[in-house]
Image (cartoon, rainbow, N blue to C red):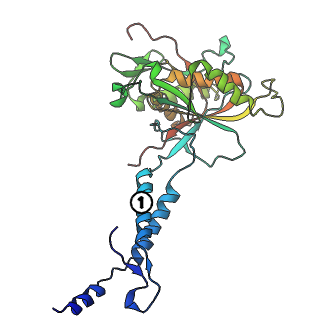
């Protein structure tokens, strides 16, 4: 084969990249829109499942809301063997209360919830309670294995701080 | 990404030849980044559990109203790593049986003209949260909306 003919064949084998670029742009758009880059109030934890929950509605932007997460934290320098095997870890120190990504020490939890409550008090005194209650909604998202005592403490602190709108988070069970 | 294919060099008539290879490289990188960080969201929902406005968290327990409730006691059995559920003195194993007994208990109060009688979940502090949610779910299934939380007394001897 002559050199010229070889060059001719080489020039004919041109890969058209345009459809590939189109598809990749579409994929990129899909993943970009699907990715949640915002700083999330909800921590990553395994919620208990419940079939009777109402699915999340869009939270009104003007409604003051605080999400309290109760999640398992591994001890320094190792993994908790019970939690790693999906068991129920009952070590008090292995459970943390997290608000907006920040772990709240147990000693200051009551104070923190009180501050949250006071930040959005209702304008008028409630006739039943005789005080100004908080308009803030408290969403409790506790891990499925979290001790009930921790959830109960948060409800107690919220009640004494004047927060009465409380919701507890759960996951929709997988279909089938 | 290898190759030097471009847009506009087909036929060799177009003098403007755009090399798309760097573009493809960058899009590939972005695609990989978003694919790796992508996570399907778990569908979440909530149970409303608003506190009574006039009571706060402590509540006002009256002696005569102490018995006006359906009380589900829950204890944590450390040795067997499981939760023990009790309604009255009866231990209940299955969810179906518990749902049935809660319904019967609540219906009895409804017949006595006390439809607002709550179901009180009286769980020990060590009980796993998902066990409490199971009982709440059973109440909601039976259309009982008034659920109260109590922090249980210490477990009976032997647990």
Q: Nearer the viewer, residue A172 or B144?
A: A172
How far across and how far down the image is residue A42, in percent? 54, 39
Instruction: Name the quarter where the C terminus of chain B is drawn.
Output: top left
How far across and how far down the image is residue A168, in percent? 56, 34
Residue at the front extreme of this rendering = A3
Q: Quadrant of residue A117?
A: top right
Q: Nearer the viewer, residue B32 or A131?
A: B32
Instruction: Name the quarter where the N terminus of chain B is drawn.
Output: bottom left
Q: Is residue A125 left or right of residue A146?
A: right
Q: Is residue A140 above or below residue A148?
A: below
At 41% from the left and 29% from the top, the residue drawn is B97
Q: Chain of mark 1?
A: B
At 22% from the left and 88% from the top, the residue drawn is A6
Which residue corresponds to mark 1?
A: B29
Residue at the right extreme of this rendering = A124
Residue at the left extreme of this rendering = A1
How far across and how far down the image is residue A54, in percent? 56, 44
Identify the element where label 1 is drawn.
Answer: helix
Q: Is residue B12 above or below residue B43?
A: below
Asked whether residue A163 appears in the rendered view, the answer is no
Q: Is residue A163 left or right of residue B36?
A: right
Q: Quadrant of residue A127?
A: top right
Q: Is residue B70 above or below residue A16?
A: above
How many marks the image carries: the answer is 1
Asked whether residue A91 appears in the rendered view, the answer is yes
């Amino acid at each position: 084969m002559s050199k010229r003919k070889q060059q001719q064949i080489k020039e004919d084998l041109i890969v058209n990249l345009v459809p590939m670029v189109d598809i990749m742009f579409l994929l990129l758009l899909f993943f970009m829109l699907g990715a949640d880059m915002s700083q999330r109030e909800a921590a990553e934890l395994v919620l208990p499942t419940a079939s009777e929950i109402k699915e999340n509605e869009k939270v009104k932007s003007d409604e003051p809301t605080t999400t309290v997460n109760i999640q398992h934290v591994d001890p320094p320098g190792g993994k908790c063997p019970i939690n790693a095997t999906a068991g129920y870890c009952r070590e008090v120190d292995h459970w943390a209360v997290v608000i907006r990504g920040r772990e709240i020490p147990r000693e200051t939890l009551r104070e923190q919830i009180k501050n949250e409550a006071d930040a959005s008090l209702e304008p008028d005194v409630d006739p039943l309670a005789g005080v100004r209650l908080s308009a803030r909604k408290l969403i409790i998202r506790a891990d499925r294995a979290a001790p009930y005592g921790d959830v109960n403490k948060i409800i107690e602190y919220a009640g004494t701080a004047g927060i009465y709108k409380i919701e507890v988070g759960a996951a929709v069970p997988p279909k089938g | 990404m290898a190759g030097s294919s471009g847009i506009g060099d087909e036929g060799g008539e177009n003098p403007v030849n755009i090399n798309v290879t760097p573009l493809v490289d960058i899009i590939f990188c972005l695609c990989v980044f978003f694919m790796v960080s992508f996570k399907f969201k778990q569908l979440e929902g909530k149970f409303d559990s608003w506190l009574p406005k006039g009571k706060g968290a402590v509540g006002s327990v009256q002696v005569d109203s102490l018995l006006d409730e359906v009380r589900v006691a829950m204890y944590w059995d450390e040795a067997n790593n499981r939760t023990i559920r009790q309604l009255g003195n009866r231990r209940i194993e299955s969810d179906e049986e518990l749902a049935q007994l809660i319904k019967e208990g609540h219906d009895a109060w409804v017949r006595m003209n006390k439809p607002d009688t709550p179901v009180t979940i009286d769980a020990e502090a060590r009980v796993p949260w998902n066990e409490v949610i199971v009982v709440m779910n059973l109440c909601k299934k039976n259309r009982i909306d008034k659920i109260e939380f109590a922090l249980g007394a210490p477990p009976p001897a032997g647990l």
